[in-house]
Image (cartoon, helix red, strand yellow):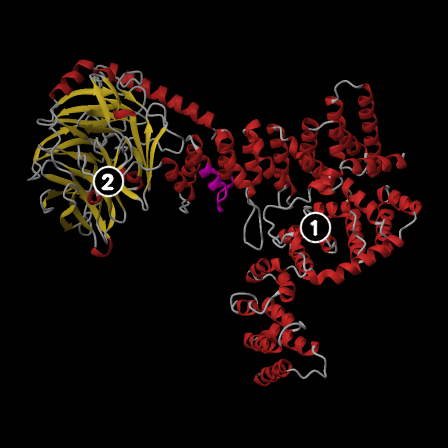
Amino acid sequence: MLVNRVGLAIATALALSAGAASAAEPTPAADTKPAAQAKPAKASKAAKAKTAAADGDKRALASARVDGLRAALFGEDDAAAVAAARELGASGAGNAAEPLAELLAAGAAPSRAEASLDALAKLGGGGVLTAPRAFEVLDLYAGHRAPELRQRAIKALGTIKDPRVVPTLMARLGDAAPGVRAAAGEALAARKESAAKPRLFALIKRGDMSAASPMAALATPDMIPQIAELAGSVDDGVLATTLGEYAQRDDVPDRLRVDVVRTLSGMGGAAATTALVEYIASVPSKDDRPSKREAQKLLDTREAAK
Amino acid sequence: MSADIRGAWRRLALLAMLGTVTALSACATSPYKRAGNPGEIASALARSRPAPAGARSLVFLVLGGAGGARIAAYDLAASRLVWTQPGEVTTRIAVGADVLVHGSAPVGPGAGGAVIVARDIGNGAVLWQKPLAADERLAGYDIDASAVYLVVQKVGASKRETSGSVIALEPRAGKERWRHVLPTGRVAGPAVRGGLVAVPVDSQYVILLDGATGGELAQAMSTAEAATFVRGLPEGMFFGSRGVFLLSPATARGSRQAPGYLLAQLPPFVRPFYWYDLYRPEQQQYSAIDRNHILWRVAVEGDRARFRDDTVVVHDYRFLFGFDATSGALRWAYSHPSDAVASTDTGSVIAFVSADGDVAALDRVTGARRYQARLPGEVVRAATFDAEGFSPTLAGAETGAGAAPDVVATLGAIVADPDRRFPDLKLFAIEEIGRQPGREATGKLLDILGERGLTPLAVQKTSEALAARRDTQSADLLAAALRMHADYAEGRTAPPVDFLAKAVGALGPSGRSVTPELVAQLRLPETPTPAAAQIARAMIATGAEEGLPALRDFLTMYRADPAHDADPSALIAAAEALIKLGGAAERRLLLFVAEEPHTVAALRVHLVRALGETDPGAPAAKTAATRAASATSTTTSTSN
């Protein structure tokens, strides 16, 4: 009976996959770059992902094992289902995503859905999440009413090297749940998605801490004065985190870092001090760059003032 | 006390009162043996010679503020202040030919009752003052060219010892001309018209006196409702309480069936207040009643009466509404930035004065502004108009003349107004917008739904009005509203999707063009569960087959979510939509959902029944449904 049920579930999920696929349509608010604008700098990463995918294919699970894990996923034992999802995620196998996507497409209780989304994220992190069904299902769950499921789906979506995920990530930057916004921001920052900058800046203006790190990762030098101007109208912690992490980036000219360090010092407060300390700590001890000296000098001055 | 019990008490009280009335009027020694005599009423009315409307258009203002308590005369036609005099006004100003009277506070310690003050209309100078004795109570007064008529109650130790009199005084000298002792101490303020003085007594009677001699001419009797007011207008003498009787031989006994009885059809928010209750001394004072009442004039043909132009105007603080008196339909609406403290129907325009010194007049039929002036820097506490027939016709900026106000825009402004004193009025405005034709009204209702701070009842009324209008020409407006969505980054909140979806559903097949927007909302995480249910119902109503993939996704994604255990209505609605709009593939999916043990129990139960009921007679499907039902009961008990 159980096998029959699993069979029916899978057959139904497969037959109706068009439903989940339609979820991949971009939302009206999403505003992003066309896929054609994918960055050339990603070529080497894409090649790495291809290699990983190829490795994943090589590491394919035996079909009998996949069937067994699928049966556990759809079975009545919740603990066994969660364990099966974890095993599939940890396998790094190219064929491990399919049963997870089937379960999600057919609908599952929250514990199973969470485990399956985590497993897909893990597979994505290994670069083997290439099945179209995985994208469709993850895109669908990115709109789930439970924020913890959305957050997991966004994390997993972020690992997919496909520009189709960008509109959903952009839309979720406006999510009501901070965790979902943070996950979307991190995913966009990891993809160096510069189209996300205006929305991240809007979040910074609203004092949203979840946007601080992604903004730091994506900000261009011309944005730094705009961010600095928000001092006084936005929570210091948000600005200090954004500017502090920006200063830590390798690609920032040191002269600009000096300005950023001075801006941080001018802000005052514990958050700015923490950002300065963290910046100094991030610079190798042998590196005596001017911004590091300036940061140390400003810190000393603050100490003395106390 | 319940409404039924109150109603029963009222009926009993009325029966008792009518019994008393009949007994009194039938008794040989009754002071009311003349009551209800049509012939006497006719001859009394024949003696009434109302003066033709003068060319005067004045408003007398009771001013406060930094300048202290003052009384002023303002000439509407010339748009100028004629005079200002210091003075306290305690009771309403009444205006005669060349004299006005008002009440004033007693002067000095131990002073008795009220003081009547007469002033020269030309310059406001005090002509005379008449203080009442300590045991006298002023029931009211009125004035015409010949006299000032006071109704005074002499308060005795008991009800029986309390008496009432009408006193006529020379307008400019204040000397007593005559005094008429009334048959009872229960007396109310008078009204005078063309030398005929009407005085309500004992709640049910109106005694008619000759203004020249004080002789009693006739008695009217109100058998259907109390007579708490009398009012003299150029078109006739009126009395009544809940409604208005034109005094005539036909209404000598106050029957509501008489052709001279008037009662306007008005919406529930309107306080049915036609004139002051002259038995209540507090209503002689300027009060909230002057800001919230019905303005009416009458067209009279013999005994027959109807509201002039079939219109009555409701003054509700800052707002004025023109209604069709027969149907209750709204004709026009006007909103003023501040409270209008006084208003009058001149027969041509509705003139009003606002608390901050605006003086304006609206066309009584169209609501178009026909006059506007301003008293800068003044605080107007109250006002009395003496502007019968005032009919400004000059167009142009100097008179503030303008087009009739846009009803939808005015009603929308009333709903959006932050003034929280008028919840019932706002609900009325919402309903009225719903009744107005055209896209503008639909758009306004959508704007209202998008506003913050509306009460839940106002939101519900708006939603109902939107759905009820079934405006198939405005489906694109609904689509545009549904395209909005919550966005934290942009500080946007979600639109009221459930209400919008309901409105789309009400359009039937004409709403199908809105399906893409409904689908997008169904997929959004912030769309509340009740809204999702409403979307599914709207898709059924519009026949939106293109929404099937979204419905499938919704059902499968949440079918096993325990969050829907308590309220599976959205899942059930989606399942129903799949049954009604889908084909064989959807039925297979639903069968799977019904069989799968993790599916929310209530949804499974519903599906088993629904699939069985909707299967076109295929025995196999019935068997499947039965099997599914059996599986449901098994797994439900297992889960439990």
| Chain for disc number 1 | A
Identify the residue shown where x is 86% and y is 41%: A75
Q: Which residue is mark 1?
A: A150
Give percent across and percent down for residue A69. 89, 46
In the picture, measured across the screen, residue A64 lies left or right of residue B188, that is: right
Determine if the magenta segment contains residue B454: yes
Q: Is residue A107 visible?
A: no
Q: Is residue A236 magenta?
A: no
To which quarter of the image does residue A215 belong? Answer: bottom right
Q: With respect to residue B280, does A151 lie above or below?
A: below
**In this view, B191 is above or below B71:** above
Q: Which three-letter amino acid code belongs to the residue tagged 1?
A: Arg
Q: Position of residue A209 (x, y in %)?
A: 62, 63
| Residue sitting nearer the eye, A263 or B202 | A263
The C terminus of chain B is located in which quarter? Answer: top right
Specify the amino acid type for callout 2.
Answer: Ala
Residue A212 quadrant: bottom right
Magenta region, residue range: B443-456
Subunit ID for the residue under disc 2: B
Q: Position of residue B101 (x, y in %)?
A: 15, 40
Q: Nearer the viewer, residue B409 or A88?
A: A88
Quickly name the residue at label 2: B401
User: Mark 2 packing: few (<14 Cα in 10 Å), some, or many (20+)?
Assistant: many
Does the image show residue A115?
Answer: yes
Q: Specify whether disc 2 shares its chain with disc 1.
A: no
Report how far apart the C-alphas of labels 2 and 1 lie in the structure.
Answer: 60 Å
**Secondary structure under badge 2?**
loop
